[in-house]
Image (tube, rainbow, N blue to C red):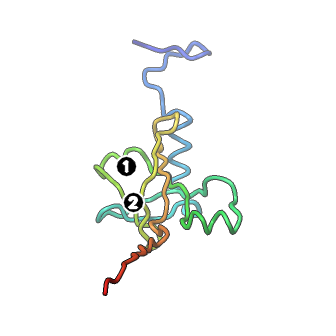
Amino acid sequence: MTIKSIKGNPVSKPGPNVFDCFARDLFGNPDLTEWCEVGNRRVSCLVSRSGEKLTGAELAADNGEEFRLGFLESDWRQLGEVSYVTYRRRQYRITAQELDASGLIRNISLKSGEEPQRVAVVYASVSQ
């Protein structure tokens, strides 16, 4: 089937759409991309902080850093089942993931594994 452009010229195969170009430009920009490790593979990603700026008290209560990484969906599919991502030599667990509207970029929400240390208090009675 031949598709006709607005000018009436036949177009046999459309080129990449605007989303393809955007993703290619985004991940091709060395000022924006970073690298992380997933399993034993090194993968390019984009970093963004998520949520609002927390106060000191809220950070102390949460005791973990939260942010998002964006991956090309084509790269992410090759990784298989993933629970953790290593970014800047620290391991983070995946809390959520979603595919963007274009279907090209997988956004992963991460949280540091630094959970508050739990201390058990044991009360014992001593019989004489």
- Identified at 39% across, 60% down, the residue is 43
Q: Along the line of sight, which residue is nearer the eye, 28 or 57? A: 57
Image position of 111 with respect to 102: above or below: below
Asked whether the beta carbons under mark 1 and mark 2 sit within 8 Å of each other, the answer is yes
Judging by the rendered image, the residue that carries numbered circle 2 is 43
Neighbours of disc 1 within 10 Å: few (<14), some (14-19), many (20+):
some
Query: In the image, which disc is placed on residue 102?
Result: none
What's the amino acid at mark 2? Val
- Identified at 47% across, 26% down, the residue is 14
- Identified at 53% across, 56% down, the residue is 46
Q: Report the quarter where the C terminus lies.
A: bottom left
CA–CA distance in space, label 1 to label 2: 9 Å
Quarter-wise, where is residue 22 in the image? Answer: top right
Measured as percent of width and height from the top left, residue 3 is found at 48, 15
Neighbours of disc 2 within 10 Å: few (<14), some (14-19), many (20+):
some
Q: Report the quarter where the N terminus lies.
A: top left
Judging by the rendered image, the residue that carries numbered circle 1 is 76
- Identified at 46% across, 73% down, the residue is 117
